[in-house]
Amino acid sequence: MLRIRRIYDNVLPVNKSTLNQVQEILRSRFSGVAEEEIALIGEKLRNPFKQRFRTILFVAESIKSKVRGFAMLLHEPELHFAYLDWIATASNRAGGGIGGALYDRIRREATALNVAGLFFECLPDDADDCQDPAELKLNRSRLRFYERYGARPIVDTDYESPVKPGDTCMPHLVYDDLGSSQPLKKAYARQVVRAVLERKYAAYCPADYVERVVQSFKEDPIHLRAFRYIKPEAVVAKVESRSAEQIALIVNDRHDIHHVNERGYVESPVRVKSILKVIEPSGLFAVIKPRPFPDKHLHAVHDEDFVSYLKRACAEVPAGKSLYPYIFPIRNKTRPPKEPSVLSGYYCIDTFTPINANAYLAARRSVDCALTAAREILDGRRIAYALIRPPGHHAERRSFGGFCYFNNNAIAAQYLCAHGKVAILDVDYHHGNGGQDIFYRRSDVLAVSIHGHPRFAYPYFCGFEEERGEGEGEGFNLNIPLPEAVDGVKYRKSLARALRRIEEFQPQFLIVGLGLDPAKGDPTGSWSLTMKDFAENGRMIGALGLPLVVIQEGGYRTQTLGKNVLAFFRGVAEGVAQWADSRHEHHHRVHGVTFRDTIVPEDGPRVRRLVDITGFFNPEEVDVAEELVGEYLAKGDASGYHFFMADHYGRLAGYVCFGLIPGTASSYDLYWIAVHPDFQSRGLGRRLLVEAERRIKAAGGSRIYVDTSQRVQYASTRAFYESCGYRLETVLKDFYTVGDGKAIYCKSLI
Ligand SMILES: [Zn+2]
């Protein structure tokens, strides 16, 4: 059994171990790779644009998490191409199709990224170019493999020409059109080749070599080598449709022992059965067995005496009997009573949630399921669903109620928050009072609940908007109480507000308490959400792109439970796919950014810090950036400089500085544009530039000039200007230093 998993970061412990294995494979299989480059892989994943490419890593691993192979793809979002940097298996005679499975996955990813082509290097398969017979044999089998996809070396160019005398065995540049059958256009190929040589081989290829190779791409379209190993009609070029990773489904296998037969107890075993019946055949889910977890996870969010009380009290009730609380300690909580039926009220918030022999066992198993779901996420899966009952979101630190005993989603949140910040989004019709109570004084877990207003809905005594958290936790509890009549449209407005707050919080994980009682016709609710609304809610949640644990809470209209769950998860999957695509678009939303054109004295050091952290500028340039702010503060508009600043919660996220070029009628110079690395490739630079252009035009400006270096590090800067409509006007050769010219771009505003 082999699974292919995308590694998003090197933060989770499981990913750290995976990365170590990937690095080991690189060392053992590619002796020529520098240790610094191997060490950089983790950094590239965390900060993917650091190397001016987005790094995407896939590993093929056995069920025991042993890495059998990996592939690393570089994505260039400005020029729309993908470059396969590495594809390697752990052993030489791996077989088993690991390389094939990885290459298929890479093609699907490249297609999903909407690139025009996939490029990579492959060592030569001609005896003249490769003297080592064993190596030659390997190269031939590789090129034969790629030919099956229609991918072949680019020919009739100087790409294979030696960089230094004595260079042998120069690789081919191979092009895979990803099944589009589009010819490779010269202009595009030249941009790609330049980007690859300048960025990947900066240390090895001198500028004149790069220039010569780029210019050698003369044919239009570019020629690919004729098929050598297979017949063209045997090509399997089509990219399989993207098969999204399955959602882990963890079902409480002991839920049905908890069956309260009293009339009106709607929290019944049929709920889980009716959901399973609909979602199991969908193919969307992979069933994972619940694993046992120790009691310490319960104690991490619940009082120990409450946990032991529930265990003991449930065990003491005779089989088939239920104990209902009926009297509650609102006057004196310091003296727990002895009589069992009275004591139950000491730990409970209502009169309809019974203590009985099986309640504890079923609730304890629900906890295991929630933790198993969280564990799946730590193991690298993106979405896990704990389909459980009894539910948990009304259980507080030291009390049960509302059909709930232990707070499953709080326990999962506590478990995950050892690895990063967690947001809980409770979308049950009833307020998530348990999560609120447990995390009320904490800022590492954000609790958000959208629910029926407590003036008419259970639990009646909390869920008000003004309950915002206390102390350290102030502002980290958000209640959105809604009126009695709510439809899908109205609901989504509140959901959008909740999701904005979650995005601002920037959690590592999201837990959704999935209540289905907002549905039309639910016996415990008053709203009218339809299947389509659940799909749309799921899509909005999925589009956050956060690792997601969904935990079943309420929802009692059995006829529609299954359909609504399935619609919700289909929506989530769609949202995740949208998120994956939109990450590569320029207009990616950045929440919480505000703009201004006023300058304050603190902006001097803030600009310095920002310019410095981008890593693009030398110390003198950093000084100049700060000085310009000082000039403006001293002289105002007479300084000739104008600023436009972007702030994100008190931090400078980016800025632009421009001014009229002295001695010209209406030509402007763009002096500075800088964006904090956290906001790069999210459209902020473009936004700043557009705003500067608007202001320049309003001031009567006709042309904007911007100059930049020809150095490799500036390749993406140049691509950025080009994509914003700037044309390369001229290059002053060797301007900064020998081999580093000044490139001057211009955009006309008329
Ligand atoms: Zn509910």
Image (tube, grey):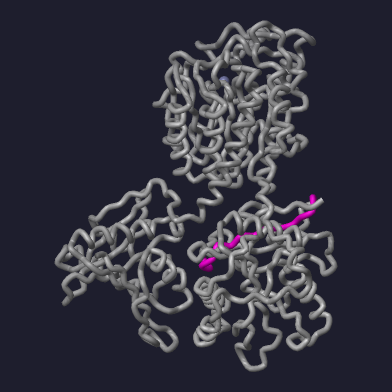
**Quarter of image, res 181:** bottom right
Which region shows up in magenta? Answer: 50-63
Q: Is residue 131 found inside the magenta-colored segment of the image?
A: no
Q: Is residue 58 found inside the magenta-colored segment of the image?
A: yes
Image position, residue 128 (x, y; %):
75, 88
Q: Report whether residue 407 is seen.
A: no
Q: Is residue 412 left or right of residue 48?
A: right
Answer with the quadrant where ligand 1 appears in the image. top right
Note whether 23 is above or below 211 in the view shown. above
Note whether 714 is above or below 604 in the view shown. below
**Quarter of image, res 232:** bottom right
Image position, residue 138 (x, y; %):
80, 75
Tell me the residue at 40%/83% (across/down).
741
- Give the farthest residue toward the bottom: 165
Q: Report whether residue 194 is seen.
A: yes
Image position, residue 396 (x, y; %):
57, 24
Q: Quadrant of the C terminus?
A: bottom left
Magenta stretch: dominant SS? strand
Q: Closer to the camera, 690 or 685?
A: 690
Q: Is residue 386 left or right of residue 79?
A: right
- Give the farthest residue toward the front: 233
Tell me the residue at 34%/74% (across/down).
745
Image position, residue 294 (x, y; %):
73, 35
Tell me the residue at 63%/56% (across/down).
109
Q: Closer to the camera, 88 or 24?
A: 88
